[in-house]
Image (cartoon, rainbow, N blue to C red):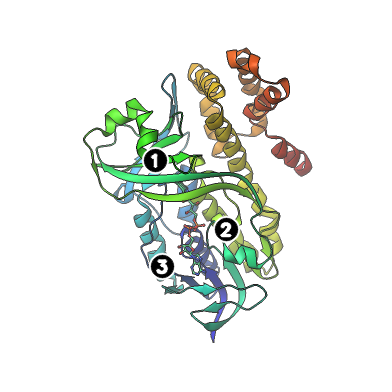
């Protein structure tokens, strides 16, 4: 029999961050993952400044030696481009393997017990088994990813899946040509480019159609293709599912979910890992005072803005006329784009943006030629969404006030 205060199922970024945060609060933590480190996964590999701050709260500082800093975000389409710098700090592009190694090293430093190559057997209504041994624990954290078995075992099923898209990534040997993370918008999907070293970039593709290949998306983005011309590939192409998912609850009894297991935002928001750091810090606060209710109550706020951004991005992906109008406006008024970025990072409020940005955006969309062919209800809804307030979020906000 194995004993611990907290058993963590899954040793991806979410599980490792939770292990660190709980150990920092003095708990005896056992983390198990079926794989062995360092664990790789398809990812855009960008951490925004806010994610770096949370990583520092977990005792990990990242420097240029771990990857490559970036100063902001740029959106590019064949007709428009717009960029905004971060107001405070810089982000870091960091290979997934390197991030995993840093998190594992911090766990080891703190004395987290790590069981690699160990599958946790999760079956409904039965105690968890770790490599066929019974485990006795006060808390379980399900950080077992998108298809979480722990989530299913506590009866939370799939939750509400708002979007399901498919991502791939590949690394290229090339000096980064920009200190921005570039998001290129094409007809078949988005390609985003993160500098991850002095001579290395990560190219991540996200598309709605599962059969669309990376080459096909890149073929629709000639400016990006020109940059990649002749650059050697440094890794094999890896793929993964990315969803925007909401759960009704993220705890049941002594079980809490974290990371992608607890709900997610589309990969193009670049927020998945950051969310898991924030959740880890909140979860540790809750468990330290034996009150998972604190985590349950605070979790929705962590996902609210990324969900809102996902909805906007998904509309931009799905409707070319809408994308063209919105990117056209943002490139003509880059301060609006800067405002959106700051809102995304939690540095500006939604209300502020509604006052300054939404009316201009709404007018622009109304005047777009394609708008004439749209049913008025759908048009109103898209303006409403692009005014960056989805109905759900609006309701959630007014309930919160
Ligand atoms: C194409 C793409 C690009 C992305 N780009 C970004 C980005 O730029 N920035 C960003 O922040 N996020 C990005 N994301 C999202 C990010 O990758 C995820 O949010 C993140 O990996 C979630 O971490 P996790 O620990 O919750 O899950 P995972 O990383 O999936 O880890 C789950 C772990 O649980 C283990 N496991 C599962 N079941 C068991 C079991 N029964 N027993 C033991 N172990 C088990 C698995 O082996 C795995 O290691 C991207 C995602 C995709 C697909």
Query: Disc 3 and disc 1: Cα gap in Å?
Result: 27 Å
SS assignment at label 2? helix
**Would residue 162 be found to the left or right of residue 115 on screen?**
right
Between discs 3 and 2, the one toward the N terminus: 3
> Which residue appears at 64% of the width and 68% of the height?
153
SS assignment at label 1? loop
> Which residue appears at 38% of the width and 61% of the height?
39
Q: Quadrant of the N terminus?
A: bottom right
Q: Quadrant of the C terminus?
A: top right
Residue on which disc 2 sits: 261
Mark nearest the camera among 3 and 1 is: 1
Tell me the tag on residue 313. Answer: none
**Would residue 217 be found to the left or right of residue 309 on screen?**
left
Between discs 1 and 2, the one toward the N terminus: 1
Nearer the observer, 211 or 175? 211
Label 3 CB sits under 8 Å from any ligand 1 atom: yes
Vertical comparison of 196 with 149: above or below: above
Residue 141 position by quadrant? bottom right
Is residue 55 something one can see in this rendering?
Answer: yes
Q: Residues within 10 Å of mark 3 (few under 14, many from 20)?
A: some
Residue on which disc 3 sits: 35
Vertical comparison of 369 with 13: above or below: above
Nearer the observer, 26 or 226? 226
Between discs 3 and 1, the one toward the N terminus: 3
Query: Disc 1 and disc 2: Cα gap in Å?
Result: 26 Å
Q: Residue furthest front?
A: 211
> Which residue appears at 62% of the width and 78% of the height?
127
Label 2 CB sits under 8 Å from any ligand 1 atom: yes
Q: Position of residue 119 (x, y in %)?
A: 48, 73
Vertical comparison of 370 with 341: above or below: above
Residue on which disc 1 sits: 213
């Amino acid at each position: 029999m194995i004993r611990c205060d907290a058993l963590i199922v899954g040793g991806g970024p979410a599980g490792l961050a939770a292990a660190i945060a709980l150990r920092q609060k003095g708990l005896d933590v056992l983390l198990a993952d079926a794989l062995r480190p360092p664990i790789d996964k398809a990812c855009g590999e960008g951490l925004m400044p806010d994610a770096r701050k949370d990583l520092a709260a977990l005792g990990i500082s990242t420097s240029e030696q771990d990857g490559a800093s970036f100063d902001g975000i740029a959106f590019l389409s064949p007709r428009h481009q717009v960029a905004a710098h971060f107001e405070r700090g810089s982000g870091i592009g960091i290979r997934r393997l390197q991030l995993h190694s840093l998190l594992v090293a911090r766990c080891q430093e703190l004395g987290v017990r790590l069981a690699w190559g160990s599958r946790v057997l999760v079956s409904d209504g039965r105690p968890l088994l770790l490599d066929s041994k019974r485990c006795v624990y006060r808390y379980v954290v399900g950080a077992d990813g998108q298809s979480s078995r722990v989530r299913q075992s506590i009866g939370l099923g799939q939750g509400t899946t708002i979007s399901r898209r498919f991502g791939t990534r590949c690394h290229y040997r090339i000096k980064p040509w920009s200190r921005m993370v570039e998001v290129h918008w094409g007809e078949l999907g988005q390609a985003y480019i993160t500098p991850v070293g002095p001579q290395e970039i990560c190219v991540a593709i996200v598309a709605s159609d599962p059969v669309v290949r990376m080459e096909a998306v890149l073929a629709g983005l000639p400016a990006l293709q020109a940059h990649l011309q002749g650059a050697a590939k440094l890794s094999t192409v890896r793929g993964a599912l990315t969803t925007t998912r909401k759960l009704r609850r993220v705890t049941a009894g002594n079980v809490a979910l974290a990371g992608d297991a607890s709900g997610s935002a589309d990969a193009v928001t670049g927020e998945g890992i950051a969310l898991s750091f924030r959740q880890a810090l909140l979860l540790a606060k809750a468990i330290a005072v034996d009150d998972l209710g604190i985590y349950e109550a605070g979790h929705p706020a962590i996902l609210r803005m990324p969900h809102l951004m996902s909805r906007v991005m998904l509309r931009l992906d799905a409707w070319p006329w809408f994308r063209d109008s919105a990117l056209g406006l943002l490139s003509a008024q880059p301060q609006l784009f800067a405002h959106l970025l700051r809102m995304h990072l939690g540095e500006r409020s939604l209300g502020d943006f509604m006052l300054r940005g939404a009316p201009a955006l709404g007018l622009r969309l109304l005047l777009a030629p394609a708008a004439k062919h749209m049913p008025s209800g759908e048009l109103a809804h898209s303006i409403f969404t692009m005014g960056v307030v989805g109905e759900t979020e609006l309701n959630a906000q007014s309930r919160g006030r």
